[in-house]
Image: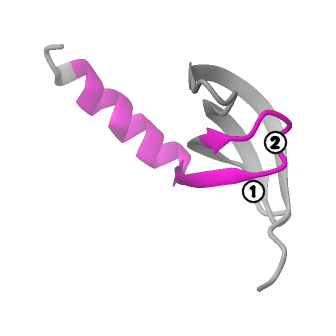
Amino acid sequence: MAEIKFEILKTIATLSESPKGWTKEFNLISWNGRDPKYDIRDWSPNHEKMGKGVTLSNDELKRLQQVLKEIDF
């Protein structure tokens, strides 16, 4: 399997942390040298390993923002 290259360009927020030190983060990431996208996923303490996550384009993030504003939490 090919190595996945990534660069975290901006850490926007840490959403939670597990007892083992893994953090769920909201970041702006460039994957394999491509244009950056917004990303939510779990990361090991030194960002050596990652869990499955969700990657969003600018348009998708704007739509998600609209939807979240409509939800009554």
17 versus 35 height, above or below: above
Picture quarter containing residue 44?
A: top right
Question: Label 2: how many residues lie within 10 Å, few (<14), some (14-19) or many (20+)?
Answer: few
**What segment is highlighted magenta in the picture?**
42-69
Give the side of residue 18 with respect to residue 73, left or right: right
Q: Tell me the tag on residue 35.
A: 1
SS assignment at label 2 = loop
* Amino acid tagged 2: His
Picture quarter containing residue 38?
A: top right
Residue drawn at the location 53% of the way across and 51% of the way down: 53
Residue 18 at x, y percent in the picture: 57, 27
User: Which comes sooner in the sequence, label 1 or label 2?
Assistant: 1
* Amino acid tagged 1: Asp
* Extreme residue toward the bottom, this view: 1
Q: Nearer the viewer, residue 58 or 17?
A: 17
Does residue 66 belong to the magenta stretch?
Answer: yes
Residue drawn at the location 85% of the way across and 63% of the way down: 5
73 versus 30 height, above or below: above
Residue 21 at x, y percent in the picture: 69, 27
Q: Tell me the tag on residue 47.
A: 2
47 versus 71 height, above or below: below
68 versus 63 height, above or below: above
Picture quarter containing residue 42?
A: top right
